[in-house]
Amino acid sequence: MTLEEQVKAMLEALRPMLQQDGGDLEFVKMEGKTVTLKLVGHCGSCPYAMMTLKSGIEQKSGTRRGARRMKTVNVSLVGVGGQGILLTANLLADAAALSGLDVKKSEIHGMAQRGGSVISSVRFGDEVHSPIIPEGQSDVLVAFDRLEGLRWQGFLAKGGKVLMNNVDLVPVTVSSGLQQPVTDFEARLAKAFPDVIMVDAAKIADEVGNARTMNMVIAGALSALVPFEESKWIEAMEQMLTGPKAKLLPVNKEAFARGRKVVLG
């Protein structure tokens, strides 16, 4: 029996468990050791369907016992509205899901306008129970501007990595005179993040010909810091930019590649 036949037999054994709750699954394709399935019926809209399916596969195949499990990886993306933070977080979450990982995502918005603080949390691994990243537990802190990075330094875990966009935005509270600007900013930044990975995303985006691809530059740099293949990011990007937006794929892919090169050289 081939590996594909073994997988199909395992899935057939799982069907009754799904069908008893009005759901089902369809085998789409198998490439190498990657299996693509389509969840239908109640499973198609159930937020716990993948967890149920994954647990069933582990039970049938015996892979849970003695298997080496991937720990949950926490990524916090911080900045202000209008920088493309939420789109970047969605791209990260989609790439992780396409890599076969369990993913949870949460967002906190500040003022409902451009310039308000935005924090997006993405957690992925073999099994993730909560979308919330506890303080001091972020494996990667992605700051879309330097001040927001400094503001949320408490999110970073000991030994975590910091990816920072080399740009400074003046908060509305400072420009309006309600608050004083941060003093000794450069010294505080150097003390908080001695091993920061700095990327000039705005400059690179201008060089590729579209200033709005700044977030894709950052996404490319981030892709070098997380444990799944570059191809999954590209696949996620292609799924995101469809229809009329498909014309933006070439410049976004170029921006992504340039950002990735900043980290990998």
Image (spheres, rainbow, N blue to C red):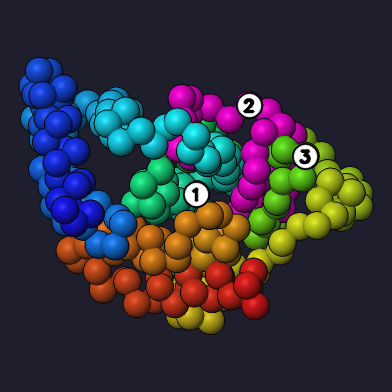
Say few, some or many: other residues with alpha carbon within 10 Å of mark 2 (under 14 / 14 to 19 / 20 or more).
few
On residue 158, the disc is 3
How far from the left and from the top, in percent, is residue 193? 81, 51
Q: Between disc 1 and disc 2, whose residue precedes?
A: 1
Task: Determine which quarter of the picture holds residue 242.
Answer: bottom left
Separation of residues labelled 1 and 3 (CA atoms): 24 Å
Q: Which mark is residue 242?
A: none
In the image, taking residue 144 as reference, residue 136 lies left or right, namely right
Label 1 crowding class (10 Å Cα cut-off): few <14, some 14-19, many 20+? many
> As drawn, is 170 to the left or to the right of 105?
right
Q: Of the residues under marks 1 and 3, which one precedes in the sequence?
A: 1
Q: Which is nearer the N-term, disc 3 or disc 2?
A: 2
Q: Label 2: which residue?
A: 134
Q: Amino acid at mark 3?
A: Lys
Residue type for callout 2: Pro
Q: Residue 85 got which mark?
A: 1
Question: Closer to us: mark 1 or mark 2?
Answer: 2
User: Which range of residues does the magenta coloring cover?
Assistant: 125-154
Residue in the image at 71% along x and 39% along y: 156
C-alpha gap between disc 1 and disc 2: 20 Å
192 with respect to 220 (left or right): right
Instruction: Locate residue 70, reporting x and y percent.
Output: 52, 41
Residue 10 vs 255, above or below: the answer is above
Residue 141 is covered by the magenta coloring: yes
Per the image, label 1 sits on a secondary structure element best described as: helix
Q: Quadrant of residue 152?
A: top right
Is label 3 in a helix, a strand or a loop? strand
**Measuring 65% from the left and 39% from the top, which residue is drawn there?**
138
Question: Which one is in front, 229 or 30?
Answer: 30
Give the residue at the far front of this rendering. 1
Q: Is residue 30 magenta?
A: no
